Image (tube, helix red, strand yellow):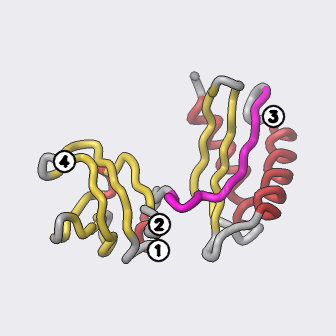
């Protein structure tokens, strides 16, 4: 869709201050076409987790502001939720915050003949994620990471 990145940028500009005013963090934002039409997903979080009331409050306020701005164009479904147990790691601060947690990482290019890694997040500094992988520390540049998530440990 032409201009989709502009729509996402504008949605972020509207939603992020609302989410932050509630003492929450906008973890991720997704706007995509699905079988039921366009869906706008906001993933929010805070240390200690979020409640259904947090989701409802953010949903109401974001929807009102998006409707006034007529962003996104046309009908859409707004979903606001927590990141869940497998929280995505997107920004440098995410990797700093979750040091010593287990993570899954997928890279854009192979590193040591592999693109998928699971292990303990040892450190993050200077744009490099350090993960304990196969009993040694592997360094993965943040700009090579396509996807990263926390991994639930029962």
Which tag, 3 or 4, sits closer to the chain's start? 3
**Eyeballing the image, is 117 above or below 152?**
above
Which residue is located at x 39 percent, y 75 percent? 99
Badge nearest the viewer, 3 or 4: 4
Residue 118 or residue 16, whichever sits in front: 118
Residue 67: quarter of image: top right
- Categorize mark 4 by other alpha carbons within 10 Å: few (<14), some (14-19), many (20+): few
User: Upstream in the sequence, badge 1 or badge 4?
Assistant: 1
Q: CA distance from mark 3 to mark 4?
A: 44 Å
1 vs 109, left or right, is right
Instruction: From the image, tell me which residue sits under label 4.
Output: 114
Residue at mark 1 to residue at mark 3: CA–CA distance: 35 Å
Mark closest to the chain's N terminus, 2 or 4: 2
* Mark 1 neighbour class, 10 Å CA radius: few under 14, some 14 to 19, many 20 or more: few
Number of labels in the image equals 4
* Residue of label 3: 70
For residue 94, the mark is 2
The answer to whether residue 146 is left or right of residue 6 is: left
Q: Which mark is residue 97?
A: 1
The stretch in magenta equals 75-87
Above or below residue 4? Residue 127 is below
Q: Residue at x 65, y 23 (%)?
A: 35
Answer with the quarter of the image where residue 134 lies. Answer: bottom left
What x and y, as percent, mark residue 16? 68, 57
- Near mark 3 (Cα within 10 A), the count class, few <14, some 14-19 or many ≥20, is few
């Amino acid at each position: 869709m032409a201009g989709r990145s502009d729509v996402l940028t504008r949605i972020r500009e509207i939603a992020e201050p609302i989410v932050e005013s509630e003492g929450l963090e906008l973890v991720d934002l997704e706007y995509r076409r699905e079988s039921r039409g366009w869906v706008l997903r906001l993933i929010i979080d805070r240390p200690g987790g979020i409640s259904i009331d947090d989701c409802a409050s953010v949903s109401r306020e974001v929807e009102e502001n998006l409707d006034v701005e007529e962003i996104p164009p046309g009908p859409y479904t707004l979903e606001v939720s927590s990141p869940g147990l497998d929280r995505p790691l997107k920004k440098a601060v995410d990797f700093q915050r979750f040091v010593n947690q287990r993570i899954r990482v997928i890279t854009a290019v192979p590193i040591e003949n592999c693109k998928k890694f699971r292990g303990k997040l040892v450190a993050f500094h200077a744009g490099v994620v350090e993960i304990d992988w196969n009993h040694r520390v592997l360094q993965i540049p943040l700009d090579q990471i396509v996807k990263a998530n926390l991994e639930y440990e029962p």
